[in-house]
Image: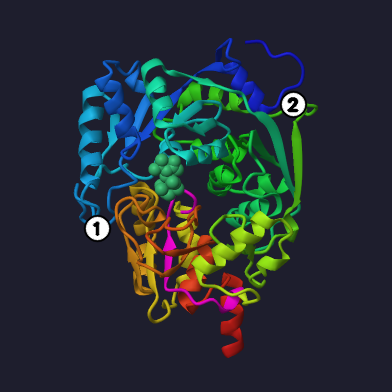
Amino acid sequence: MAISGASTLFDKLWSDHTVCDLDSGETLLYLDRVFLHERTGSIALQSLHSAGYEVRDARRVFCTMDHIVDTFPGRGDKTLMPSGSDFILATRSETRAANIRLFDVNDADQGIVHVISPEQGLLLPGLTLVCPDSHTCTQGGIGALAWGIGSSEAEHALATGTLRVRKPKNMRVIVDGELRSGVTAKDLVLYLIAQFGTNGGAGYAVEFSGSAIRQLPVEARFTLCNMAVEFSAFTAIIAPDEKVEAYFAGRDFAPKGEHWEDACSYWRTLRSDDDAAFDRELRIDGSLIKPMVTWGTSPEQVAGLHEHIPDPENFEELHRREAAQRALDYQALQPGQAIADIPINAAFIGSCTNSRISDLRAAAAVVHGRHIAPGVRGVVVPGSRRVKREAEREGLDRIFVEAGFEWRDSGCSMCFYAGGETFGEHQRVISSTNRNFEGRQGPNTRTHLASPTTVAASAITGYITSAEALVNSEALIA
Ligand SMILES: CC(C)[C@H](C(=O)O)[C@@H](O)C(=O)O
Ligand code: SF4
């Protein structure tokens, strides 16, 4: 379809994938990839099957076992939640019947859906991908149009290879300035949500751009885009650059030979035109950001690690005041408490936000030669089995285990209380994940979202601590 005038990257991908505009005001979009997982994908496949429909093109469909599968070494089909294995078994039989490539429980390439898809080159810049999972936006980090859908939309996607979608508006978030050392993409996205609220991106597809974004390694771009859904955005996208080309070079399903050159030439066209108009533009000075952590039960209830728990009375709007009070009650925290004085019971490194090899390297560098505080439980869950193998090749597993962490098999694990695993009631967990609502990590479990380096440093001190503060405090003692 021809594009007239200046366009955003999002508009270009939308237009390139438009089959037709519908009378309903929606667009019928062509889907290059559909990804499924055992929690929602099994439901979509079963429902499609019982309605008598077939998967239109199984070559474009992939499925993994990540949400419910447990992450204990030597795992099988059983999970702590007795009903968990029903999802696993249904996923296996439905994908087999439909001829869909499944990354099964103990497949060498199994892992969290949003980690394994770009990792293998199953998704590439410029392609569309949907998955019945809200964090599909993660994959916009390489310049693909990827968004989360519901199970019934997944049925439509599977049966037709297309989807009816209402076009969101365009937002650009420009992050200039240089991120300080020790400040990560996780801190950046928490800062964004702190500034503009969890509703800030509602109705928009967000393009991240600016000098701080160009500086981010590709895996950090996934972290940033991952939490676009916590900002209520339709999805997020970052224009691919030479870092993205280097990321894909040699990946299993990335184009090879002359196709590689063609692909790179095409990817270089994937950017917003200079004079493209955005419906909304937000600006952030990246140099102002410090390590962040959530104190409440929403990603917008967040503060710098050097700050104090706010007083709900100081929130202007009534609903924010009430939400803050309720969050403090749930989290058992007091207004005015220094964040650095909050003791933790557990530390979790994992999830589609922060479980890639660069996350594990950064966390391992913090814990290397140190030991987690007495009474604190630490768990590290690689995002995929490939990440796990690479970490083990580099000796990161030994660093974690010697520091007192459990080293697990890959999956969503304790990001989400689906397989039945939890740190327990009233346990306070510092977590590299993306959601902190009540009960997210198990009944009455208290979650504090932070970067993997903050999680690692906190595990060592037993208090919410930045990696920088850990090093400074040791220097004082020495
Ligand atoms: C189970 C799944 C549908 C869910 C999602 O959509 O995001 C989960 O991955 C989550 O993070 O809450
Ligand atoms: S790791 Fe967590 S956020 Fe990501 S897909 Fe799994 S449950 Fe959802």
The image's colour scheme reads: rainbow
Residue at image coords 67%, 44% = 200
Q: Looking at the rendered structure, which numbered label has been put on residue 273?
A: 2
Residue at image coords 35%, 73% = 402
The secondary structure type at the circle numbered 1 is loop
Tell which of 67 and 24 is nearer to you: 24
Q: Is residue 433 left or right of residue 21?
A: left
Q: Position of residue 389 (x, y in %)?
A: 33, 52
Is the residue marked by circle 2 packed among few (<14), some (14-19), or many (20+) residues within 10 Å?
some
Q: Looking at the rendered structure, which numbered label has been put on residue 257?
A: none
Residue 270 visible to an observer of this rendering:
no
Q: Position of residue 278 (x, y in %)?
A: 75, 31
Q: Are marks 1 and 2 in contact (CB under 8 Å)?
A: no
Q: Quadrant of residue 155?
A: top left
Amino acid tagged 1: Pro
The first of marks 1 and 2 along the sequence is: 1
Is the residue marked by circle 1 packed among few (<14), some (14-19), or many (20+) residues within 10 Å?
few
| Residue placed under numbered mark 1 in the picture | 73
Residue at image coords 54%, 39% = 246
Q: Quadrant of residue 252?
A: top left
Q: Quadrant of the C terminus?
A: bottom right
Residue at image coords 62%, 55% = 300
Could you tell me how far apart the alpha carbons at marks 1 and 2 are, in whole angstroms? 49 Å
Q: Is residue 430 left or right of residue 224?
A: left
Q: Which residues are the magenta region?
A: 339-354
Quadrant of picture, ligand 1: top left
Question: Where 198 falls versus 99 (above or below)?
Answer: below
Q: Is residue 169 left or right of residue 465?
A: right
Q: Is residue 28 rendered magenta in the image?
A: no
